[in-house]
């Protein structure tokens, strides 16, 4: 897919990246668009499957969950059937078809190590056609997709929107109500409070306070995702790196700050650092790798993988062009794969 987003589209998306739930009366002026124009332009992008606002576990929730990457090897004839089984699993957040001697690369979320083991051993490894798996538990998040920006707005426009809520001193206890709201936000993180309250069975005022508290305490993060091909960043490459243990945190944070990096994570495996990048051209892969190695001499690249196709990204089911065609709400607490995905209306 060629880049098909206009400059006004990119400015609008950048504004929503900075303030995912802000009203159009705030977002429109920040990107020099009338609020009604901004709302209509956004809806057109949503209807075409090019953008979506996602909810993901925030730093506080990630400390309570067990997350991991998983290599899955399967035969070429079995790949589509394996993908179909994985797509509807709400604890399989992302699925990528990759090269480099692999078949599929997954992002997993569970509420305990036992639940993660059940997911891998009882639900994934037993799928017909799965030949081998390799697990990379995530131990620290240095940067992830919610901090990636299109860089389409001026600095003054960014300052008008990029405001972070003050964190309360006390952490928020996680209840069934919070889990239900997390699942509702997974369908559409920009959904009006009235729609969210109807889904979770609470009053709009209670739902509004609960969303604000979940954001303020870091239970959830929100991010505006854009189809990478349409935005002009069609190449996804992942790196498995190794650095001295004493340098891990400093290197992880440094790599997270690079503009092309979509994620930087410590993992408990022979490679101890995982980095994901969006790039404009295949030739940028060697340049990006050289830039990382030049900035951090102790860094060793153990492996790299280029995505051939992203099938699912943080609950969004994508077509071959990277457009959202369905949603499987994220649910780290889910115990089975029997629930079918909730489809997105694109009529």
Image (cartoon, grey):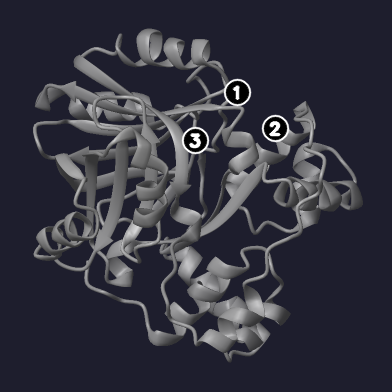
Q: Which of marks 2 and 3 is in front?
A: 2
Q: Which of marks 1 and 3 is in front?
A: 1
Residue 60 seen: yes
Residue 347 seen: no
Image quarter for residue 98? Answer: top left
As drawn, 121 above or below 84 = above
As drawn, 93 above or below 12 = above
Residue wearing tag 2: 179
> Badges 2 and 1: C-beta atoms under 8 Å apart?
yes
Residue 338 in the image: x percent, y percent?
A: 50, 19
Local secondary structure at mark 2: helix
Q: Is residue 20 left or right of residue 177?
A: left
Residue 77 in the image: x percent, y percent?
A: 11, 24
Q: Pick whichever, 25 or 48, lies toward us.
A: 25
Q: In this view, does 9 lie to the left or right of 105?
A: right
Residue wearing tag 1: 333
Local secondary structure at mark 1: loop
- Residue drawn where x is 60% and y is 23% of the image: 333
Local secondary structure at mark 3: loop
Residue wearing tag 3: 341
């Amino acid at each position: 897919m060629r880049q098909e987003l206009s400059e006004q589209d990119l400015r609008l998306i950048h504004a929503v990246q900075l303030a995912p739930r802000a009203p159009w009366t705030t977002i429109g002026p920040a990107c020099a668009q009338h609020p009604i124009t901004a709302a209509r332009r956004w809806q057109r992008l949503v209807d075409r499957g090019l953008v979506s606002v996602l909810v993901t576990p925030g730093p506080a929730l990630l400390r309570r969950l067990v997350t991991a990457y998983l290599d899955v090897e399967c035969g070429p004839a079995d790949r589509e059937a394996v993908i179909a089984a994985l797509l509807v699993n709400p604890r399989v957040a992302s699925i990528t078809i990759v090269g480099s001697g692999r078949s599929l690369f997954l992002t997993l979320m569970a509420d305990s190590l036992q639940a993660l083991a059940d997911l891998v051993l009882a639900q994934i490894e037993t799928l017909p056609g799965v030949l081998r798996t390799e697990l990379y538990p995530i131990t620290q998040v240095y940067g992830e997709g919610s901090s990636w920006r299109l860089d389409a707005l001026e600095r003054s426009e960014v300052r008008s929107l990029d405001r972070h809520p003050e964190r309360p001193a006390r952490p928020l206890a996680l209840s069934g109500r919070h889990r239900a709201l997390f699942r509702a936000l997974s369908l559409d993180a920009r959904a009006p409070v009235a729609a969210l309250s109807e889904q979770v069975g609470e009053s709009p005022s209670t739902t509004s306070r609960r969303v604000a508290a979940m954001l303020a305490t870091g239970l959830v993060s929100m991010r505006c995702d854009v189809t990478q091909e349409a935005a002009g960043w069609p190449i996804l490459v992942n790196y498995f790196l190794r650095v001295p243990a004493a340098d891990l945190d400093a290197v992880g944070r440094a790599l997270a700050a690079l503009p092309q990096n979509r994620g930087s994570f410590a993992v408990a495996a022979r490679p101890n650092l995982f980095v994901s990048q969006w790039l404009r051209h295949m030739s940028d892969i060697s340049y990006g790798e050289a830039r990382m190695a030049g900035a951090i001499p102790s860094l060793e690249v153990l492996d790299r993988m280029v995505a051939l196709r992203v099938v699912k990204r943080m609950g969004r089911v994508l077509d071959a062009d990277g457009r959202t065609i369905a949603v499987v709400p994220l649910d780290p607490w889910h115990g089975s794969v029997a629930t079918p995905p909730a489809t997105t209306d694109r009529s």
